[in-house]
Amino acid sequence: MERARGSPRNSMREDYGAVVRKKSMSEAATGTRWFRRFVAALAGTALLILPVLFSLRAQSQSAQDAVRAVLTAQQTAWNAGDVDAFMSGYESSDATTFVGATITKGYKQVLENYRHRYPTKEKMGRLTFAAIEVTPLGAEFASVIGRFHLDRTAEAGGPASGIFTLLFRKTASGWRIILDHTS
């Protein structure tokens, strides 16, 4: 037996269905509003973070460029036979350390060792750096790994080559080597 549309029981079902539909639409609208707010917050956060990330990347690149410039200046000075200019790439500090066959501490002692070992332009030879990898370690430090080669006559000691690891620190005078391990 079928009831008529206007019967109280059908009317209740229709009213309940309308309420459920209205509630579902309301929940969907609330979900949409929530999603829109979430997306807006996410976009706002991205707009705040992206410039910082780009700035860090730019700082990282400028640090790498500055460190490479020090190495280029050192290579040029070395090839000109100028040990003092070569040493300007090192921090003038008692803490500056060179590790080779022995450990030498202090800028002045490192300079004296270079002067003693390479007293003439011929003994210095022609320096080339290769396979340079600069890794920024925050805003004030960078590590460098690379290879060096000295072209010299047999009388001047013959060719020499090896690898090195450098630790640079950003100082008031620019990027300077504070630790040099060359072998």
Image (spheres, helix red, strand yellow):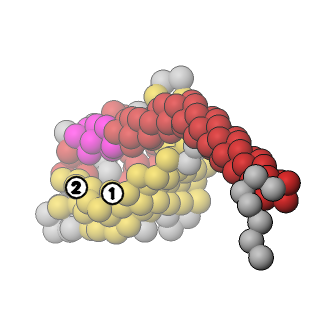
Residue 74 shows up from this direction: no
Q: Which residue was labeled with disc 2?
A: 128
Q: Quadrant of the N terminus?
A: bottom right
Dot 1 falls on a residue whose secondary structure is strand
Residue 132 got which mark?
1
Q: Is residue 53 left or right of residue 87?
A: right
* Whole-percent x, y for residue 57 in the image: 44, 40
Q: Quadrant of residue 156?
A: bottom left
User: Magenta span has 25?
Assistant: no
By secondary structure, the bulk of the magenta-drawn segment is best described as helix
Quarter of the figure with the C terminus: bottom left
Label 2 to label 1: alpha-carbon separation? 11 Å
The residue at the point 22 percent across, 40 percent down is 76
Per the rendering, the mark at residue 170 is: none
**Dot 2, how many residues are within 10 Å of its Cα: few (below 14), some (14-19), or many (20+)?**
some
- Residue 54 appears at what percent x and percent y? 45, 36
Q: Nearer the viewer, residue 163 or 46?
A: 46
Numbered range of the magenta stretch:
67-77
